Amino acid sequence: MSQPEDPRAANKARFELELEFVQSLANPFYLHSLAQQNILNQPAFVNFLKYLLYWKEKDYARFIHYPHALHHLDLLQHAQFRSEIGKDEWREYLNQKQFDHWRTW
């Protein structure tokens, strides 16, 4: 007989998994890859991106190491950005803007 999973452990695992995913959104090449695979156009994924906006709240944002992740999460709320990031020139543009920010910050 299996015992029910510890709710605290389950919450911690979910928190860590979602944190890792949100932080991966800071990578323009990862966003480009998601777009190339048509993942960004799937309604369930768009809903998931909307759900993840809670990471912008102060209590959660403090765990984010890559602030561009939250900016990109905002951009991903827009259908136009989700379609444009699939283009190589958009990926390069976003990558360059991010680099310029880090270089001068």
Image: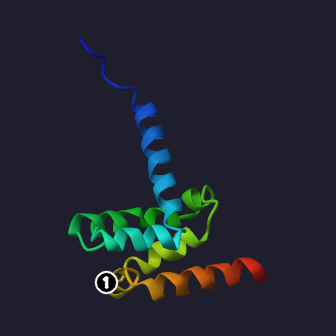
Tell me the quadrant of the picture where the C terminus can be found: bottom right
Residue 105: in sight, yes or no?
no
Q: State the residue in front, 38 or 18.
A: 38
In the shown orientation, is residue 35 left or right of residue 9?
left
Residue 103: x %, y % from top left: 76, 79
- Residue at far top of view: 1
Residue 30: x %, y % from top left: 46, 67
Residue 21: in sight, yes or no?
yes
- Residue at far front of view: 88
Q: How many marks?
A: 1
Q: Residue at the spot x=57%, y=79% of the render?
A: 95
Q: In which quarter of the image is residue 94?
A: bottom right
Residue 100: x %, y % from top left: 69, 84
* 53 versus 91 height, above or below: above
Q: Residue at the spot x=43%, y=67% of the render?
A: 53
Q: Name the residue under label 1.
A: 79
Residue 43: x %, y % from top left: 22, 69
Q: State the residue in front, 84 or 73.
A: 84
Name the amino acid, label 1.
Answer: Ala
Q: Residue at the spot x=39%, y=31% of the render?
A: 7
Check disc 1: other Cα within 10 Å, few if <14, some if 14-19, many if 20+.
Answer: few
Q: In which quarter of the image is residue 87?
A: bottom left
Q: State the residue in front, 39 or 79.
A: 39
Q: Residue at the spot x=37%, y=78% of the render?
A: 77
Indicate how the structure is coloured in the image: rainbow
In the shown orientation, is residue 46 left or right of residue 20?
left
Q: In which quarter of the image is residue 49?
A: bottom left
Q: What element carries label 1?
A: helix
Tell me the quadrant of the picture where the N terminus can be found: top left
- Residue at far right of view: 104
